[in-house]
Image (spheres, rainbow, N blue to C red):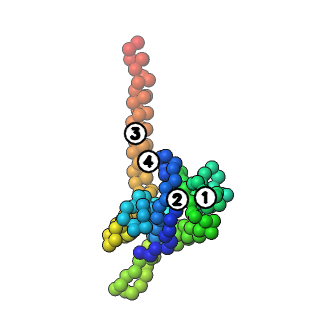
Amino acid sequence: MALLKSGWLWRQTAVLKRWKLNWCDLWIDGSLCFYKSDNRRDLEQRVSLKMACIDVRTGLECGGVTPPESNPRENLIVVHLRDGSMLNLCANSEDESLAWKLTLLETRRNPVFTYDPYDDSYQAIPLNSHHTVYITPGAGPGTHQVVVQRDPFDGVAESVALGLLAGVAAGAAMRSFLWMPFFFC
């Protein structure tokens, strides 16, 4: 797996909203990994940008976010995620924040390729396909993590059918209660 960009970034925590300095690795499969130090032993958070990222903004585009002490607003990077949350980051310079933004956006767009040594060829992996398997780097050296991506709309038809069935049953029960006063008169 290829490493696209790595370096120190400030990351704002979700609960207490305090800034922490983390070593960040951005892999070609779209995994943005945050570590406590640059030896990559203690993985703190992993975000899959290919599936979760909607938009990336930097500098003055990041309204409502206060940068860490001694850092100007131009160094901010805000990653908007699909679940409505934001990942607030801050680089050490404006040029570095722009480089991170371009790399994050490029990672979101580019397909992932696998190498088949038997055919000596590369094949593109469909990112939103049903039962796609990715092998990503793990927390320690020499370890890997297998990620199985499922289609987010898998099982929607069964849920809709079950909801319709429950609605019909509730309607039938309510109709029987409406006739009850006529039976007791």
Tag 3 near tag 1, CB within 8 Å: no
Q: Quadrant of the C terminus?
A: top left
Q: In this orientation, which residue lies closer to the viewer: 61 or 140?
A: 140
- The label nearer to you, 2 versus 4, is 2
How many marks the image carries: the answer is 4
Marks 1/4 in contact by CB < 8 Å: the verdict is no
Label 3 secondary element: helix
Describe the element under mark 1 as helix, strand or loop.
loop
Which numbered circle lies on residue 115? none
- From the top left corner, tell me how far across and down residue 38 is, in percent: 43, 67
Task: Evaluate whether residue 129 shows in this view.
Answer: no
Secondary structure at badge 2 equals strand
The mark found on residue 160 in the picture is: 4
Q: Is residue 33 left or right of residue 53?
A: left
The answer to whether mark 3 and mark 2 are in CB contact below 8 A is: no
Asked if labels 2 and 1 touch by Cβ distance under 8 angstroms, the answer is: yes
Q: Earlier in the sequence, mark 1 or mark 2?
A: 2
**Outermost residue toward the front in this view:** 70
For disc 1, the marked residue is: 71
Q: Which one is in front, 131 or 17?
A: 17
Label of residue 10 in the image: 2
Give amino acid for label 1: Asn
Q: Residues within 10 Å of mark 2 (few under 14, many from 20)?
A: many
Q: Is residue 45 visible?
A: yes
Which amino acid lies under the numbered mark 3 shown in the image of this protein? Ala
Bin the neighbour count of mark 4 within 10 Å (Cα to Cα): few under 14, some 14-19, many 20 and up. Answer: few
Judged by depth in the image, the label closer to the viewer, 3 or 1, is 1
Of circles 3 and 2, the one toward us is 2
